[in-house]
């Protein structure tokens, strides 16, 4: 994908009067855990325990990517909702924070208790 973007930028810079440049400023290798991994199952169980229906597991660009790429079991969770991400209008809803923090603490405690099992899976 990176090469494709550079080719497009190069082509555009030759065919226009506008100067175009492209610079890689970070890299998040792609990786994931299987949905049946104990850490994924635990995170989904915590959500159900606190009355939240888990969403379909997905892959995205998160801070967990580098850990996963280095074979360290990791999940990325959110503790609230919001909108307009990565804009000056970005916001979070403060109402769900207490429930989200409870989910986070439960997952941390569960993970601490089963760390060895999660690493071996």
Image (tube, rainbow, N blue to C red):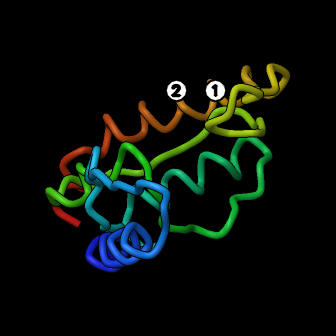
Dot 1 surroundings within 10 Å: few (below 14), some, or many (20 or more)?
some
Residue 43 numbered mark, or none? none
The structure residue drawn at horizontal position 57% and vertical position 67%, both measured from the top left corner, is 57
Label pair 2/1, CB-CB below 8 angstroms? yes
Where disc 2 sits, the SS reads: helix
Q: Position of residue 16 (x, y in %)?
A: 49, 68
Judging by the rendered image, the residue that carries numbered circle 1 is: 102
Where disc 1 sits, the SS reads: helix
In screen coordinates, is 48 left or right of 41?
right
The structure residue drawn at horizontal position 31% and vertical position 34%, both measured from the top left corner, is 112
Judging by the rendered image, the residue that carries numbered circle 2 is: 105
Give whichever of 22, 52 is nearer the camera: 22
* Marker count (numbered): 2
Dot 2 surroundings within 10 Å: few (below 14), some, or many (20 or more)?
few
Give whichever of 56, 105 is nearer the camera: 56
The structure residue drawn at horizontal position 67% and vertical position 39%, both measured from the top left corner, is 85
Quadrant, the C terminus? bottom left
In screen coordinates, is 109 left or right of 52?
left
């Amino acid at each position: 994908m990176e090469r494709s973007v550079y080719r497009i930028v190069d082509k555009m810079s030759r065919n226009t009067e506008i100067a175009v440049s492209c610079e890689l400023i970070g890299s998040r290798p792609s990786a994931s855990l299987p949905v049946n991994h104990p850490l994924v199952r635990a995170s989904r169980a915590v959500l159900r325990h606190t009355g939240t229906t888990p969403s379909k597991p997905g892959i995205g660009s998160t801070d967990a990517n580098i850990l996963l790429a280095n074979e360290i079991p990791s999940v990325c969770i959110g503790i609230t909702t919001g909108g307009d991400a990565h804009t000056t209008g970005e916001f979070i809803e403060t109402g769900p924070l207490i429930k989200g923090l409870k989910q986070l603490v439960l997952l941390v405690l569960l993970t601490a208790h089963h760390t060895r099992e999660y690493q071996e899976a």
